Image: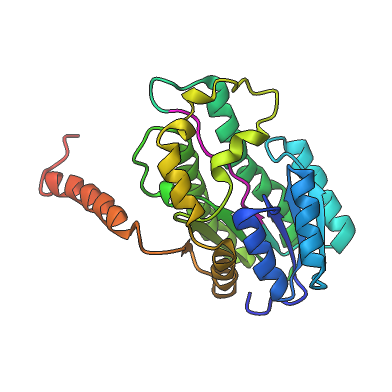
């Protein structure tokens, strides 16, 4: 999608952090943007700031962990803009607990927001993008943790799922003139360490000390506070959409870890090279 001007984008988790960075970068390219977020106050603040620049933006509050609310947000987007070309599945939360401290509610919250909402986003918006025949693009935010886990927490599991889904969809949707990219950011200046502020009451997650967010929180928070500017990430995403990048990375910090992972995978194949499988 070389010419983004006049296109319509739907961005989840769009009121702050990476989502707002992406929304801003797209709006700067002339894209009409529907911001979707669970926090009404943050959504109102983001819209106020963007509208000062005369960007054509609107907002809709939705809890993406509820499919019905995501469907309603899609309907609001069509009502406001008439069509949609770009889907950005960006909403995400961190935590979930390590081995020995997992809970069913912890898993459910992470799976619902980080993975099921991405699946639902594609299910809901894919046909809308196809319907006008003008082509489009889907970007889903995973994480560098979607390629190198390091821990057993559900966050990494969900992000691996987003990577797998995006890789498969890229092959399937290309003939339909829909590009697919997966965003795997590193350490970005966001509020992800405070994601628990938005846990819906239906999840029983009162014991925050059991959450992985409480493990090494101080040092990680410092790194995040000094992290990469979300607008820079948004500019990379805009370029990724224009040039149809399969993977969008934000920096090279974790490249050696990914290389080590694939070296371990290759070593596994090397161990059985030359052996004849027993039938």
The residue stretch that appears in magenta: 88-97
Closest to the observer, 238 or 222: 222
Q: How are the colours assigned in the image?
A: rainbow
Q: What is the x, y in percent for residue 72?
A: 82, 44
Disc tally is 0
Closest to the observer, 191 or 265: 191
Above or below residue 245? Residue 40 is: above
Q: Quadrant of residue 112?
A: top right
Above or below residue 187? Residue 2 is: below
In the visual, does 40 lie left or right of 155? Answer: right
Q: Which residue is rendered at x = 59% and y = 23% of the image? A: 205
Closest to the observer, 133 or 148: 148
Which SS does the magenta portion mostly show? loop
Q: Which residue is rendered at x = 75% and y = 57% of the image? A: 46
- Outermost residue toward the right in this view: 79
Q: Is residue 265 visible?
A: yes
Whether residue 96 is in magenta: the answer is: yes
- Outermost residue toward the left in this view: 274
Q: What is the x, y in percent for residue 90?
A: 61, 51
Q: Which residue is rendered at x = 38% and y = 32% of the image? A: 152
Q: What is the x, y in percent for residue 263?
A: 22, 53
In the visual, does 33 lie left or right of 195? Answer: right
Q: What is the x, y in percent for residue 9?
A: 72, 62
Q: Quadrant of residue 119?
A: top right
Closest to the observer, 231 or 4: 231
Locate the C terminus and report the quarter of the image it occupies.
top left
In the visual, does 62 lie left or right of 216? Answer: right
Whether residue 250 is in magenta: the answer is: no
Q: Which residue is rendered at x = 49% and y = 24% of the image? A: 209
Q: Is residue 143 visible?
A: no
Above or below residue 110? Residue 48 is: below
């Amino acid at each position: 999608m070389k010419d983004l001007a006049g296109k319509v984008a739907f961005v989840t988790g769009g009121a702050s952090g990476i989502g707002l960075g992406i929304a801003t970068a797209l709006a700067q390219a002339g894209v009409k943007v529907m911001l979707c977020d669970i926090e009404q106050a943050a959504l109102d603040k983001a819209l106020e700031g963007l509208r000062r620049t005369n960007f054509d933006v609107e907002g809709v509050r939705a809890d993406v962990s509820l499919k019905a609310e995501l469907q309603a947000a899609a309907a609001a987007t069509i009502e406001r803009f008439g069509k949609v070309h770009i889907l950005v599945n960006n909403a995400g939360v961190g935590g979930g607990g390590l081995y020995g401290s997992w809970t069913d509610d912890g898993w459910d919250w992470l799976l619902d927001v980080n993975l099921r909402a991405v699946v639902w986003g594609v299910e809901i918006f894919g046909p809308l993008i196809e319907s006008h025949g003008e082509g489009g693009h889907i970007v889903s935010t995973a994480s560098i943790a979607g390629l190198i886990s390091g821990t057993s927490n559900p966050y990494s599991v969900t992000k691996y799922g987003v990577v797998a889904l995006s890789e498969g969809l890229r092959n399937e949707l290309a003939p339909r003139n829909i590009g697919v990219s997966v965003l795997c950011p590193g350490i970005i200046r966001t509020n992800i360490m405070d994601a628990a502020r938005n846990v819906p009451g239906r999840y029983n997650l009162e014991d925050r000390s059991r959450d992985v967010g409480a493990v090494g929180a101080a040092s990680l928070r410092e790194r995040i506070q000094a992290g990469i500017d979300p607008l820079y990430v948004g500019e990379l995403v805009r370029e990724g959409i224009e040039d149809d990048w399969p993977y969008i990375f934000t920096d090279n910090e974790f490249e050696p870890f990914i290389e080590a992972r694939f070296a371990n995978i290759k070593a596994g194949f090397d161990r059985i090279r030359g052996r004849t499988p027993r039938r």
